[in-house]
Amino acid sequence: MRRGLSSRRSSTISAMKMWQESAGILDRLQSIHDSGDDAAIAVLVRIEGSSYRRPGARLLVSSDGSSIGSISGGCLEEDVRQIALEVMADRTPRQLRYKTGSDDETVWGLGLGCDGVVDLFVIPTKLSAAMNTVAKQRQLFQGNDLFWVATVVDVSSGTSDPGRSIVVADGNIVAGGSGDAELDGRIRALTTSSMGTGTGLYSFDTATVFLEINIPPPSLLVFGAGDDAIPLVHLAADVGFRVVVVDHRASYLTADRFPDAWRLVHGRDSGSLANIPCGEHSFAVVKTHSLHRDAEWVRALAAIPLHYVGLLGPRDRRLEIMADLSEDESRCVYGPVGLDLGAEGPEQVALSVVAELLAVVTGRSAGHLRDFEGPIHAKPSLER
């Protein structure tokens, strides 16, 4: 199932990080399960007011107390970690609510100050219901199509149980089950009834379900595998982009140099685009340090067209490269690439480039937050 460009772009910034984190947590969960160890997953299912994370954020806690992921800015993790250990022991899913605000509203003496309500659902993974969709989800996280995961949080009647989940892809249930065939059908119908259906809690006659949409992250194509590309690839991958590095020098395209890259592509000219995963949801940075190669890549990418083609180098160089581009093709070219941070050196330049990429993804002006009156965090995956 495909979405229109406008809805997908509006949801990309929050979805790209969720996709990366969820895939990593499931990989770690599978490793724990294969070793015979125990774990529990805390999922943020609802917020009111201010919150550092959005619904769908996860914290995976192992039996030794170690964890990966996050469900807050650090104020809830320790308490949730202790509760997760209790959930492992009694093997019963648990709902948690934290009120974060003034001192007289804090929960369990945690002294939180974010001014909001956070609801969590903690699932012991020793339950077969918690593992019955993991393999399918891990497979889907390697692909490039959106999918939904629905988890039963509370049951009022019927045959379902808290902790059960189903996976829906392309309009079909492809893994799992709630234990209630009628509920499964209603969940499946919900994912196909509206292109605006998004992550959140949904109440049915027999159960409350946390429905989560997983939208693949955009690709960042980096043309040029020189040493200055190393911090750019690392930082872009860290914020959630699927990074593809392209270069005509095969010896530069190694996992040792680019351990965070999604793909490494040996390409000499624009004829190599057929081997490069690029499309309307891709972004690019051209930095081969060769005027001829940069010009060829920029002209080819602007013709696709992409939303963003960042070009390293001074303004005069950009004007020379863009001389043959049409006005429409020129709109996607950002050069000199990056935000005006006064950056010096590869690491700082990488920061300015990735900051500009995120601003383009969200449509933000990239000003100071102190001057911004709207919500400072990205919106949830999709508005309902």
Image (cartoon, rainbow, N blue to C red):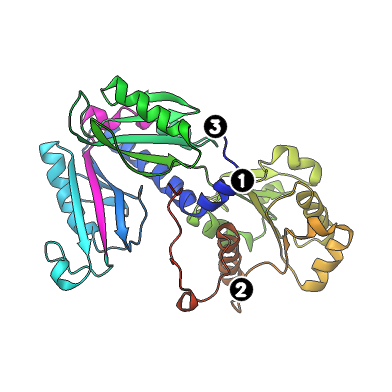
Graded by Cα atoms within 10 Å as few (under 14), some (14 to 19) or many (20 or more), the crowding at tag 3 reads: few
Q: Earlier in the sequence, mark 1 or mark 2?
A: 1
Residues in magenta, as a range: 116-136
- Label 1, on which residue? 5
Q: Residue at x 49, y 57 (%)?
A: 239
Is the C-beta separation of discs 1 and 2 under 8 Å? no
The answer to whether residue 71 is seen in the rendering is: no
- Label 2, on which residue? 345
- How many angstroms separate mark 1 from mark 3 (CA)? 13 Å
- Secondary structure beneath disc 2? helix
- Label 3, on which residue? 1
- Type of amino acid at the residue the image marks with label 3: Met
- Type of amino acid at the residue the image marks with label 2: Gly
Q: Position of residue 261 (x, y in %)?
A: 56, 48
Classify 348 as above or below 269: below
Instruction: Indicate yes or no whether the magenta region holds residue 122.
Output: yes
Graded by Cα atoms within 10 Å as few (under 14), some (14 to 19) or many (20 or more), the crowding at tag 2 reads: few
Work out which residue is located at the far top of the displayed protein and give it: 181
Q: Position of residue 121 (x, y in %)?
A: 24, 45
- Secondary structure beneath disc 1? helix
Q: Residue at x 74, y 69 (%)?
A: 313
The answer to whether residue 20 is seen in the rendering is: yes
Q: Residue at x 48, y 56 (%)?
A: 238
Q: Position of residue 109 (x, y in %)?
A: 12, 66
- Type of amino acid at the residue the image marks with label 1: Leu
Task: Judge from the rendering whether residue 95 lies leftward or rightward of residue 33; answer left or right.
Answer: left
